[in-house]
Amino acid sequence: FVPKAVGAPLPLLPVSDPIERPVLARPTPGTPYDPRQLLCGDGNGLSGMLDEGSFVETLSGWAKTVITGRGRLGGMPVGVIVTENRAVESAVLADPANLESKPTKAMQAGQVWFPDSAYKTAQAIQDFNTGENLPLIVLANWRGFSGGRKDMFEEVLKFGSFIVDQLTQFKQPIIVYIPPHCEIRGGAWVVIDSKINPAYMDMFAAEDSRGGVLE
């Protein structure tokens, strides 16, 4: 996926999927679905956005409310960030300094940035930009940041600002797309607005998507 040297052109492969083709995998309104299908298709004839078989997920075991990885679009490597819309289970490790502490499980809602998933998003953007020089595609479907007291203690504001920091430093094209039946609102819109980096960043929305500050 990455250039052979810093500043070298991207490694383009022969086009395996026609560029001018319909993307048939679509979000299902009101029903949880696997957002990876938007990238890879569903395996039953519905094609996804990326070239077939090209998506490779990274950091999959950490901060599962965000999906990050690399794939190819018309033979060109791209970095991809997608929102998980389903509730996921998060492992909370025991505190080694507290003998009474035990590992626990916690549920995290979909379409929400938590401290760990905000950090994961910023880290992925930095990886795509620094050294890899990959264009970035973000399939956005966020209701906002988790703002509970525990999240504030775990520095959700700092990690959210990291996303802005990395987007302002990005030197390759960034496409933010709100897929059909998806939404972006509130603080989530703030950190991925195209005005953050107007020279490289564009935002698009499907006709039946939603955007707003509040509900």
Image (spheres, rainbow, N blue to C red):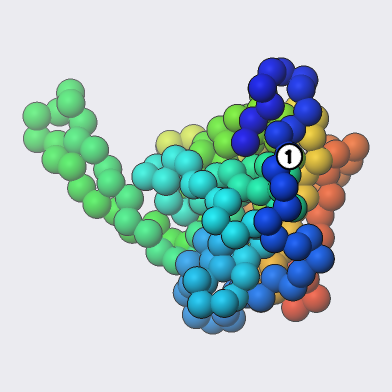
Q: Residue furthest top?
A: 6
Nearest the viewer among 60 and 89 is: 60
Residue 22 visible, this angle: yes
x and y, in percent, of residue 200 in the image: 85, 39
Left or right: 126, with 194 as reference point: left
In the image, residue 194 sits, relative to residue 51, either above or below, namely: above
Q: Which residue is depicted at the point 62% across and 66% down? A: 48
- Depth check, front residue: 200 or 213: 200
Task: Tally the marks.
Answer: 1
> What residue is rendered at 60% in x and 30% in y?
127
Tell me, yes or no, if residue 162 can be seen here. no
Residue for badge 1: 12
In the image, taking residue 157 as reference, residue 49 lies left or right, namely: right
The location of residue 155, given as percent across then percent down, is 49, 35
Q: Nearer the viewer, residue 114 or 175?
A: 175
Residue 173 occupies which quadrant of the picture? top right
Image coords of residue 29 (percent x, y): 59, 81
Left or right of residue 150, residue 44 in this image: right
Image quadrant in which the C terminus is located: bottom right
Of 85 and 171, the residue lying toward us: 171
Q: Secondary structure at mark 1?
A: loop
Q: Position of residue 148 (x, y in %)?
A: 45, 50
Disc 1 marks a residue whose amino acid type is: Leu
Residue at 68% over, 56% down: 16
Task: Choose top left, top right, bottom left or bottom right for residue 103.
Answer: top left
